[in-house]
Structure formats: C-alpha cells, structure tokens
Image (cartoon, helix red, strand yellow):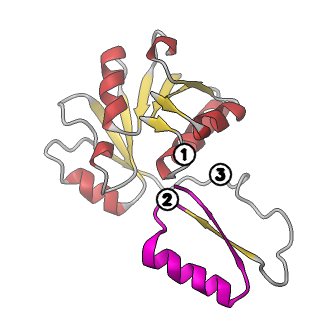
Amino acid sequence: MRLVIANHRLAEVGGTETYLGTLAEHLQELGHEVTVFAPAVGEWGRELERRGLVVVDDERRLPEDCDAVLPQDSIVAFLLADRYPRAPQVQGAHTHVAQVQSPPQLPGLTAAVVVCSETVARRMRALASPPPLVRLRQPIDLARFSPRGAARPRARRVLALGNYLYGERLRMLTEACEDLGMELVQRGS
C-alpha cells in the first residue's frame, strides 16, 4: 500500500511525533510505501529521515496518489482530504486535551480513529459525529528501547523525558535527585 502519514509539525520530539515515527518505520518494514508529511519539519523530521523514511514538508513533493492517509491531527486531515479525496483517512488521536487531534467533524471524511487509551476513546465517543474507533495499545519499539547492558550498582543520572514537566513537579524531582546525589537530565520542550 502507498501510505501518507502526517502531522502538522515534526519539529521537537513528543508523544504524537514518536507514535508517528514508530508507525511509519514499522509499516515501511512490512513493505508498504510510506511518505511522512508535515508542513513544519525540524529536528524530529530530520531524525526520521536519518532512519530511512521519506519526509516531505511541501505538498508539491507528496506522491500523486495514495491508498490511505493517516493524519495525526485535523490540520493535516483537512489538507490531505483536499489532495487525496478518494483515499480513506484513519486518524490517530493521542490526547483528550488538544482539540486539534480530534478528527474533522465532516461526515464521511474519517474512516476510523485509532486511540491508545480509554481516556481518549471516551473523548472521541463524545464528539458530535463520532467515527468508528480502533483501540490499540501504545506502541513501543522493543528493539530500540531495550537494555543496553547490566544496570549499574548505583544510579548516577535520572532522565526525565516529556514535554510537560515544569513548575512544582519539576522542582520536586530536582530536589529529590539532589538529595540522592543524582544528576537530573531533562529532555523535551
């Protein structure tokens, strides 16, 4: 199959972006022809290119035709619906908070929505025009996220990975690490 997987941004690393990358890599490994599209490409888009994916930031470089579109937000869902009017759209919805990840509320546009949590599923069912839902578990690439060796007898560093660690929660974690003599490394926006 020829697939276009899209998000409105592939700048920094986040949950939706890593989901898109995992999905695209594994679909490509299964033999599908995958094009990743985002109008705004940055660090994460370049990383996906290094991993062997075709990443496009200009609509003019998209394939002429595709068999299905997998948008991760309504911005690219509308954009790609115009370009590929006959291709079914299967949207990923990753949060119950950001409205932009709700599928477009136009009858017949979204064939199905993939959700990875019951919280998001409840949100999608509450929409005015809820599309069919496909409930999956959160995908994790076990080859990439596997132990690289034996654990150290005493941890020296703590990695805080996420885009929502700030304020009181960050202060508490920082103080706990300092009390234990550990270095805190924070990654995410």
Residue 66 x %, y %: 46, 17
Residue nearest the viewer, comparing 50 with 35: 50
Q: Residue sitting at 45 percent across and 20 percent down? A: 67
Residue 87 appears in which quarter of the rendering? top left
Q: Nearer the viewer, mark 3 or mark 1?
A: 1
Q: Residue sitting at 64 percent across and 29 percent down? A: 53
Q: Which residue was labeled with disc 1?
A: 12
As drawn, is 17 to the left or to the right of 115? right
Q: CA distance from mark 3 to mark 1?
A: 19 Å
Q: Which residue was labeled with disc 2?
A: 163
Q: Are marks 2 and 1 in contact (CB under 8 Å)?
A: yes
Amino acid type for the residue under numbered disc 1:
Glu
As drawn, is 78 to the left or to the right of 106? right
Looking at marks 2 and 1 on the same chain, the residue that comes earlier in the sequence is marked by: 1
Residue 56 x %, y %: 54, 23
Q: Which residues are magenta?
A: 162-189
Amino acid type for the residue under numbered disc 2:
Asn
